[in-house]
Amino acid sequence: MSEELRITLSTLLNLDRDFSTGRRAQPYPLFLSSAATQRSWMLSPFPHQPAAAAQAPAALAIVECVKPADFEQLHEVAAAEIQRRQVVLGLGTGQMRGSFGAVIRSPNESPKPLEIRIDGVSIPANSGNAPIPKHFRLWAPTRHAMGDAAWRKLCSLHITIIGAGRSGSLIAEALHRTGAQITLVDMDKLETHNVGESALVNIDDVGLPKPQAIANRLNESSPGSSPVECVTTELDSLHTLATIRSSSLLITTVDNPECRLLAAILAQFYLIPMLDLGTGIQHHFGDAGHPRDRTMGADMRLCLPDRCLLCSGGLPNTAATAASLLDSYRTDQAGTRRPWFRQRSGSLRSLNGTAVHLALRMLEDWLDNRLPPERNRLLQLRFTSDGTPQLTTTDFPHTASTTCPVCLSAGHGDSELPRLREILRTLL
Ligand SMILES: [Zn+2]
């Protein structure tokens, strides 16, 4: 069982600020994500909610570390007897600013060191100790262009891609061939009309679960990356939830807003950065029903969990999407859930590929610390009716206070799952 502490960069900077100005409002509540092989302790970006603090299964205490030996002695710094679990976070100050360490203490147990993930990226990756894929030299040009540290961070992420259609297959191939560890999630089976312009699959794969068809091809031709894993159950099934909980980056390439909204809420619960891609093609018809015009576009968004997707550009119709998702939880008389995983009306590989590669560029620059810090970013590409591409970039700053129910759920982990429907009702 591996254990880690998840925290966002903004939260860490706020703690550092509070600590250095004497506002040490400890202890902070810590919430839990408990999967079969991994336990993650999470600090909410909004740690001063009294109701949430009362339910928290552990607390965070912070100690100042002014020299390397202080990190080695973290478990001794807080040696007093404890009544409930406690994580001790060592915060480097002075010459040690920017260094962190953590241990977990449980009543009647020896302290254990914790891995720290900041916005999904593990601390050892920053210092060059991340596990490196086999056949290291295969990626020499990638490391040279992206930056070695950024590439190591990419390889340290467990990336879950939700949606294995055209965009999903393209981004899966690109990331797999960059050396990243990926899991593909999609409950649909491959149909003939999916084969056309999709990457990696062919007509013999029709009938296979989409993730399996893609993973088979990638694993056959793998240059040395970790094998691609597949999940073929619904997004809110226990199996899929277990995969999402142990992810350090979620990528959504889904067609429907319900799936996108649910993924965005789960990303907040578990403090997982989210890279969201959506494409659309619209035909406009004249009076006689003849095609008159056509526009197309793509949205690419990087959301760190300090600010949710709804507060970073939102969805076209949040209330209707939440209502549709709530409706899907009602079962018919036979006990079958209503389906909401719908198909898209049309797509073009050129548009999907453009969206995928613009999103990947944004991801690479984020890993290389080139994007503005403490911001979420939305790229919007539009092709006008005469084919002119227009790209706009919008940054959404993280805020210290909010009334958004999805933002406020950030980092509350497993304890927030029973409140999913209640949160959806607040969006109606
Ligand atoms: Zn929000």
Image: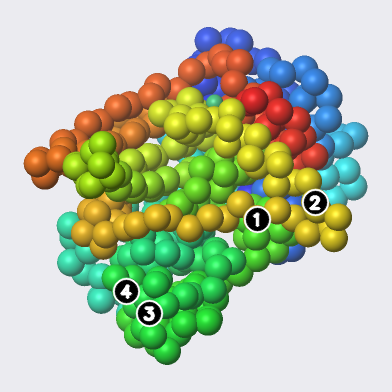
Select label 4 or label 3 by which is in front. 4
Instruction: Please tell me how crowded label 2 is: few (under 14), some (14-19), or many (20+) other residues with Cα within 10 Å.
Output: few
Mark 1 CB within 8 Å of ligand 1: no
Label placed on residue 426 = none
Question: Does dot 4 land on a helix, a strand or a loop?
Answer: loop
Residue placed under numbered mark 1 in the picture: 339
Residue sitting nearer the eye, 63 or 364: 364
Label 2 or label 1, whichever comes before in sequence order: 2
- The CA span between labels 3 and 2 is 34 Å
Residue 195 appears anywhere in the view: yes
Question: Does dot 2 land on a helix, a strand or a loop?
Answer: loop
Residue placed under numbered mark 4 in the picture: 196
**Residue at the spot 48% in from the left edge and 25% down from the top edge:** 311
Q: Position of residue 363 (x, y in %)?
A: 33, 48
- The CA span between labels 4 and 3 is 9 Å
**Residue at the spot 52% in from the left edge and 21% down from the top edge:** 14
Residue sitting nearer the eye, 100 or 150: 150
Label 4 or label 1, whichever comes before in sequence order: 4
Select label 1 or label 3 by which is in front. 1
Residue type at mark 2 is Thr
Residue 251 appears anywhere in the view: no
Select label 3 or label 2 by which is in front. 2
Label 3 or label 2, whichever comes before in sequence order: 3
